[in-house]
Image (cartoon, rainbow, N blue to C red):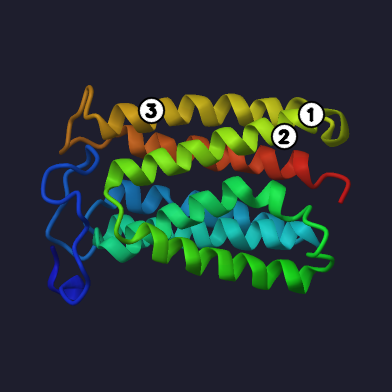
Amino acid sequence: MHPFWANLTPAQCLPSSCNCEFIRSEIIAQPFSFWSSLIYVVIGVLFLQKKNNHILWGGTLIVLGFSSMFAHGSFTELALSMDFASIIIILLFSTVIDFKFLSNLKRKFFFLIAEYIMLVWLLFNLNKWPKISLALMVFLLALGNIFYKRKTLKLNKDFYKGFFLICISFILFLVDELKVLCSPNGFLHGHTFWHLGSGVALYYFGKWRFSDR
C-alpha cells in the first residue's frame, strides 16, 4: 500500500483475496483497472449534455467512474465501499426515479446523494463477497421489476444490447475475482473488460430508459 493512502483503512481483501491484477505499492495500485474506469466518466459526460433524468444518470455514471478509480488506485475499504455503493445506485436508478414523492429533479438529486452516503456506511464493514452478493441480489430485483413493467417501459433493442453486454461482462468479472485464467502481471484482465463492457451496457441502458423522457 502506497504511503499516500496510509491514513485510510486498507481493503479487507488485501493482501491476496482481491481481483486478479497485481496490486502494486504505488499511488495507483492497479493501473489497468484504474484507467479503464474512465469509460464510466466519458459516457456520463455524454448524458450530461441532455436534460432531466439524463443529467442524473450522467452524474451517477461519473460518480461510479471516479469511485472505481479511487478503489483501484488505493485499495482502501472506504474506496471499495464507494465503488459498490455506486454500482447499487446505478442498479436501483430506474426504480428510484419513478417514486411519486420524487416529483422533480432537485428531490431526486438529494435522494440519490442520501442513498449513496447510506450505502457507503452500510457496505464499509462487509467483506468482498458479501458486497458482491448484495449487488447481485439488487441487480436481480431491479431486473425483475423491469420485466414486470415491460409493457410500460417498452423494452427495445437498446435494452437487450445492454442486458447482453452486462451479462457477458459480469461473467468476466467473476472469472477475474475467482482468478481463473489469471495473469496478475499481464495487461489483459477480466476486470478491465468488466469496466469496458458494463460501461457500454450502461450507455445502452440510459439510451433506452430515457429516450422519451
Distance, label 3 to label 2, CA atoms, is 24 Å
Q: CA distance from mark 1 to mark 2?
A: 9 Å
Residue positioned 38% across, 41% down in the render: 132
Above/below status of 165 relative to 72 = above
Q: Position of residue 66 (x, y in %)?
A: 45, 62
Check disc 1 and report the residue beneath it.
155
Residue drawn at x 43%, y 51% as measured from the top left: 37
* Quarter holding residue 159: top right
**Secondary structure found at label 1:** loop
| Badge nearest the viewer, 1 or 2 | 2
- How much space separates mark 1 and mark 3, taking CA atoms? 25 Å
Q: Residues within 10 Å of mark 1 (few under 14, many from 20)?
A: some
Q: Amino acid at mark 3?
A: Leu
Q: Position of residue 171 (x, y in %)?
A: 41, 25
Residue situated furthest bottom in the rendering: 7
Residue 22: give x, y in percent of width and height. 16, 44
Which is more toward the observer, 75 or 13?
Answer: 13
Q: Is residue 153 above or below residue 126?
A: above
Q: Amino acid at mark 1?
A: Leu
Locate the N terminus and report the quarter of the image it occupies. Answer: bottom left
| Closer to viewer: mark 3 or mark 2 | 2
Q: Are marks 1 and 2 in contact (CB under 8 Å)?
A: yes
Q: Which residue is mark 2?
A: 146
Q: Which picture quadrant has residue 60?
A: bottom right
Is 27 placed left or right of 44 in the picture?
A: left
Question: Which badge, 1 or 3, is on the more N-terminal residue?
Answer: 1
Residue at the spot 30% in from the left edge and 53% down from the top edge? 126
Q: Quadrant of residue 3?
A: bottom left
Q: Which residue is mark 3?
A: 172
Dot in front, 1 or 3:
1
